[in-house]
Amino acid sequence: MQSGQSSAGPVGRGAKVRAAVHAATLAELVDKGYAALTVENVAQRAGVHKTTVYRRWKDRESLLVDALAEHMAMDIPVPDTGAIETDLGALARSLVQAFTGATGQAVLAAMFTGAAHLPEIAAARRHVFEDRLVRAEPVVTRAVERGELPADTDPAELLKTLAAPIYLRLLVTADPVDETTADLAVHVTLAAARAGALRAASRLPEQTTS
Amino acid sequence: MQSGQSSAGPVGRGAKVRAAVHAATLAELVDKGYAALTVENVAQRAGVHKTTVYRRWKDRESLLVDALAEHMAMDIPVPDTGAIETDLGALARSLVQAFTGATGQAVLAAMFTGAAHLPEIAAARRHVFEDRLVRAEPVVTRAVERGELPADTDPAELLKTLAAPIYLRLLVTADPVDETTADLAVHVTLAAARAGALRAASRLPEQTTS
């Protein structure tokens, strides 16, 4: 009963309230950051009563976790351009776009800094990453089928290699992150993959299989 | 006057107090985490009076920033084994070691989660990373001189490529981080570098220089 098809009945209204409260939560994050996030301000911005919010979410933390999870689960187009280079380029650019701009920066700050101490946020972060990874794996398997990459290329390792330099800049170095970052990530990932450095078996190059 | 050679005079005592308080701060972080860190507990563990701590650090935040910065600045041996693969392996393993084990995990959690909202911590994080990068650059320039890597390999890009998959696992995916992670990072980085994907000029592959 959480998502409604109709916009008329109580289910439709429930879905509308959820969407409005989620949007208001993100807007409050963008404007004021996690530390200043209150259920009161979110309710006011969403145009609903505070008790309406508390009926669905027990506190600001669960509201935030829910809004972030919903936001992160959205719009993950998995590209299928027919070539690995353009597919990876699209994936890398969508990751860059997800965490740049006002909303992206606010979401990043909440997930990795402001609310990072909440176990639910840490879990949501891992879940979102894992989910995106699994969804994007066909990009790699299709490239292997087309003969663009070595047959035993590990999709998860390849996609982590693609994401890693972008997250390094977002979370550690605070270097600017833009399309150039995405292009460099594609370049490095493809070079490593083509050289066979991202083969499933190459994870343990020094060890014998036993 | 911050670091003393003698262990007798007031300078030596000052240095001893600093070292004891720093060590106590890290130990408190390991045992209780950032949220529970208090100047009182640190002083007690260090065997000094609370006012002794407050004379040097204005609050627990500046104490933490100082202790973390000192801890992170320590023991950064820059390897010079005569071969790029073993040099990068040593660098990657020292990064893995820095953030695993009880102290490493506590430092990582404080720097990237618990105290990540403090501007001084964000600044210290960037500074430490930048400092390590600059110190390690000779590893790459020596490899270029030995003809192991393309002449125009960008040392900073190469070292970021080495660090990126390790930080991704530490900060995003929460995958286990161990020597295998380090070896894979070396493998990927060398493949990309040898294929010319980490050349200074290749940062902007699609753009014309103007």
Image (cartoon, coloured by chain):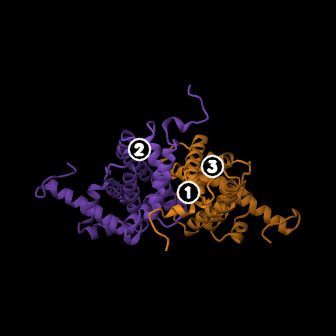
Chain colours: A purple, B orange
Chain identifier of the residue bearing label 2 in the image: A
For marks 2 and 3, give the CA distance: 29 Å
Tag 2: residue type? Glu
Q: Determine contact: label 2, label 3, CB under 8 Å.
A: no
Residue B198 is marked as 1
Q: Depth-wise, is mark 2 or mark 3 nearer the camera?
A: 2
- Residue farthest left in this picture: A8
Q: Nearer the viewer, residue A139 or A76?
A: A139
Position in image of residue A112 (x %, y %): 47, 58
- Measuring 36% from the left and 39% from the top, which residue is drawn there? A145
For marks 3 and 1, give the CA distance: 17 Å
Marks 3 and 1, the one that precedes in the sequence:
3
Query: Does residue A117 appear anywhere in the picture?
Result: no
Q: Nearer the viewer, residue A122 or A39?
A: A122
Q: Is residue A7 above or below residue A137?
A: below
* Residue topped by disc 2: A148
Q: Name the quarter where the N terminus of chain B is drawn.
A: bottom right
Residue B92 is marked as 3
Query: Does residue B186 appear anywhere in the picture?
Result: yes
Residue B54 is marked as none
